[in-house]
Image (tube, grey):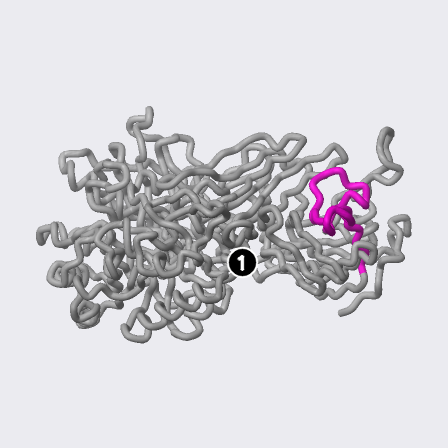
């Protein structure tokens, strides 16, 4: 429906006359006071308000209005949908920009409003600054709040967009902040701090989200965990540089905000030109599990979301590295098929001049010195064994030692006459250059046309720095990111059924912008299961488990030099898109049989992984990790109990299993217990000697004694509802 222009309304009008929009969906309500001046304001975002009337919603809006206070402005500035200094707002403004130094302070008013039960669109104008804006707020099927704004230059001179972030108000009692940081091989490490007055800013300046970026910025009641505590969080769905911030101001407002992080002069709008911000998404819940479930359900409701069972994948990197040989890879493929692998992915080393990581990037032609008959013999072997064939590529990168770089040095991103600092002996190709884009697109299309390739592992192994259009040119991060999106869309359109994994030094480009166009993320380059516990836990705050690449590792872990048992590796990899990163030809028959058992279990669990709710227990002991996946109807569940480090309790105290139907009774069985197999003389837990049935309420509130485990061990439980 269309609502009349509200620019002439004043905040002093009576509650009965106020116009309020109430968005409701997926257990979430968003209440917007249209008559807040000068712009509408969100007065509630959170739990559904199912019994509201226009009168009660109007009263809620009036109840949110601040008083005038001594020492302040005559009208106290408040957080509205696009807060600005022109409205008396002293906090971080939504839009910062200028016209060659003039018209630095925007003052939008509402021109038109369109609203229904799930979406609000506000057309805004600033006649003085000659700007127009379209602000969209919508609720998805799971109750995730999405915001985006498009800015149009309606003037006759250029307008520079300096910064643009979208605010999400949070309750005043949300006094603890949560975000993540990290590095290569240790992405998404959690950190917490008090949400005090001032601004907490998390910038990513790497041209991609980066391993140290926060996937989620959340504010909640002190001590919130996975199982309890009201918490609100935001995610910036953008694959380039971005900003997320949390701010508390003395006028009683607290909010989260996010958007693209623009380099100096990167975005200058010519007359008539527009800029659409990335979508910023907000979720909330009683505990982080409930917050993340909204994100997961939202992803699963997308039309392009992968529906078929996620194929068990073997990637060749840690098996052969650059040592490509048909007979070796054919033997590996036979071993993979023998344990139940469904997709075989040839990693780095197949293209022109690529014998190590110093050369060849950019020359996406099968190397005839290694593959005189092309990849056809290997592809035929893989398909003959009943597996799909996948291929590793890194299309945005280029080695200076490559035919492409020698022929077209102008296609490389650089800001000065000299090239930026190198990383892994590589530079970055400017995909926003039409000729560079065409060269890469044509090469990829040629590969996909010639070979039956079901899957591309799309890597991105360095951060962007000085990513410009040449000496004296502008930054190209924004344009490059949009060109990447365009290329991914083009490949999917031209090659129906193609799946793409986003990999960036492991998990350095994990965001919902790239996941609009790809089918899974490579969660981290480390396969160490102990490191993966936190990495997978906190990546899953936003990303559904079936989109997380989780692989078995070889016993000697490449990244940490630690030794890991198959039982631990399998238990940690179970709750994701299961695969293997291991030279299976090095195993004897008994070893392959044990791997095959884990593959079979992963196939049994994956229907729940792709449809159920991922849950984590808030444990008393730091060394114990409890996670599981519960069927949507509560009928079935799997859990892992991982002993990450030694605890003081010996034997351990009781553990709880959250997320089950409290009214149902469950048969509890240990289905994998490597510790018992390794130590047959160990005493037996009493409850495991006969059928044990406990209610969901008992399991969540009181729990049971787990088996005694040494550090680095795990057990897997299966729970089945009984009449």
Position in image of residue 563 (x %, y %) = 21, 37
Asked if residue 640 is positioned above or below residue 486 in the image, the reply reads above
Pinpoint residue 121: horizontal percent, then vertical percent.
71, 62
Q: Residue at x 16, y 68 (%)?
A: 372
Residue lying at 36% horizontally and 71% vertically, measured from the top left = 445
Residue that appears at 47% across and 50% down: 414
Query: Can the viewer see residue 193 in this picture?
Result: yes
Can residue 601 be seen here? The reply is: no
- Examine the rendered structure and indicate whether residue 26 appears above or below residue 208: below
Most common SS among magenta residues: loop
Quarter occupied by the C terminus: bottom left
Mark 1, residue position? 479
Q: Which residues are magenta?
A: 82-110
Who is closer to the viewer here, 342 or 570? Answer: 342
Looking at the image, is 451 positioned above or below residue 610?
Answer: below
Q: Position of residue 706 (x, y in %)?
A: 31, 37
Query: On the rendered structure, is 508 left or right of 383?
Result: right
């Amino acid at each position: 429906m269309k609502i009349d222009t509200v620019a002439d309304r004043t905040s002093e009008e009576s509650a009965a006359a106020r116009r309020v929009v109430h968005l409701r969906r997926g257990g979430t309500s968003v209440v917007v006071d249209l008559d807040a001046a000068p712009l509408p304001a969100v007065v509630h975002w959170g739990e559904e308000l199912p019994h509201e009337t226009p009168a009660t919603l109007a009263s809620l809006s009036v109840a949110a209005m601040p008083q005038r206070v001594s020492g302040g402005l005559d009208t106290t500035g408040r957080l509205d949908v696009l807060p600005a200094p022109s409205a008396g707002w002293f906090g971080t403004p939504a839009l910062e920009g200028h016209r060659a130094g003039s018209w630095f302070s925007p003052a939008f008013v509402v021109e038109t409003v369109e609203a229904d039960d799930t979406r609000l669109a506000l057309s805004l104008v600033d006649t003085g600054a000659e700007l127009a804006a379209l602000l969209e707020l919508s609720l998805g099927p799971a109750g995730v709040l999405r915001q985006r704004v498009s800015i149009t230059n309606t003037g006759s001179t250029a307008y520079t967009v300096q910064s643009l972030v979208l605010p999400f108000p949070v309750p005043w009692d949300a006094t603890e902040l949560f975000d993540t940081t990290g590095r290569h091989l240790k992405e998404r490490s959690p950190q917490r701090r008090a949400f005090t007055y001032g601004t907490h800013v998390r910038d990513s300046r790497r041209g991609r989200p980066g391993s140290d970026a926060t996937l989620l910025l959340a504010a909640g009641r002190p001590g919130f965990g996975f199982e309890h505590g009201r918490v609100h969080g935001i995610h910036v769905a953008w694959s380039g540089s971005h900003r997320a911030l949390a701010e508390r101001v003395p006028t009683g407002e607290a909010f989260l905000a996010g958007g693209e992080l623009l380099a100096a002069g990167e975005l200058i709008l010519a007359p008539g030109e527009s800029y659409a911000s990335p979508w910023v998404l907000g979720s909330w819940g009683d505990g982080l599990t409930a917050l993340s479930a909204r994100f997961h359900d939202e992803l699963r409701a997308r039309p392009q979301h992968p529906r078929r069972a996620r194929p068990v994948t073997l990637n060749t990197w840690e098996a052969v590295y650059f040592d490509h040989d048909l007979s070796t890879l054919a033997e590996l493929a036979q071993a993979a098929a023998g344990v139940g692998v469904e997709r075989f992915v040839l990693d780095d080393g197949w293209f022109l001049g690529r014998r190590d990581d110093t050369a060849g990037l950019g020359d996406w032609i099968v190397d005839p010195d290694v593959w005189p008959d092309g990849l056809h013999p290997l592809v035929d072997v893989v398909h003959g064994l009943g597996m799909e064939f996948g291929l590793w590529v890194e299309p945005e990168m280029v080695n200076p030692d490559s035919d492409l770089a020698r022929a077209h040095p102008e296609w490389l991103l650089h800001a000065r006459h000299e090239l930026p600092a190198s990383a892994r002996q590589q530079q970055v190709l400017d995909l926003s250059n039409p000729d560079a884009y065409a060269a890469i697109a044509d090469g990829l299309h040629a590969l996909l046309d010639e070979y039956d390739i079901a899957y591309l592992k799309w890597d991105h192994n360095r951060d962007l720095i000085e990513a410009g259009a040449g000496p004296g040119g502008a930054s190209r991060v924004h344009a490059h990111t949009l060109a990447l999106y365009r290329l991914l869309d083009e490949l999917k359109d031209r090659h129906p059924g193609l799946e793409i994994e986003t990999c960036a030094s492991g998990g350095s480009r994990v965001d919902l912008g790239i996941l609009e166009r790809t089918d899974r993320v490579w969660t981290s380059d480390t396969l160490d299961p102990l490191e993966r516990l936190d990495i997978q836990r906190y990546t899953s705050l936003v990303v559904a488990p079936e989109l997380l690449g989780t692989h078995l590792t070889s016993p000697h872990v490449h990244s940490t030099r630690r030794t890991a048992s198959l039982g631990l590796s399998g238990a940690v990899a179970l709750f994701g898109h299961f695969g293997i990163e291991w030279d299976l030809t090095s195993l004897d028959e008994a070893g392959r049989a044990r791997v095959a058992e884990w593959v079979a279990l992963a196939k049994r669990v994956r229907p729940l992984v792709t449809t159920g709710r991922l849950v984590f227990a808030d444990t008393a002991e730091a060394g114990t990790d409890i996670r599981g996946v519960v069927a949507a109807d509560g009928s079935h569940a799997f859990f892992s109990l991982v002993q990450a480090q030694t605890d003081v309790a010996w034997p351990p105290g009781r553990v709880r299993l959250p997320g089950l139907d409290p009214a149902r009774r469950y048969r509890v069985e240990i289905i994998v217990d490597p510790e018992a197999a390794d130590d047959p003389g160990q005493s037996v837990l009493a409850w495991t000697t006969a059928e044990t049935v406990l209610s969901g309420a008992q399991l969540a509130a009181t729990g049971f004694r787990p088996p005694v485990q040494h550090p680095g061990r795990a057990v897997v439980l299966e729970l089945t509802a009984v009449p």
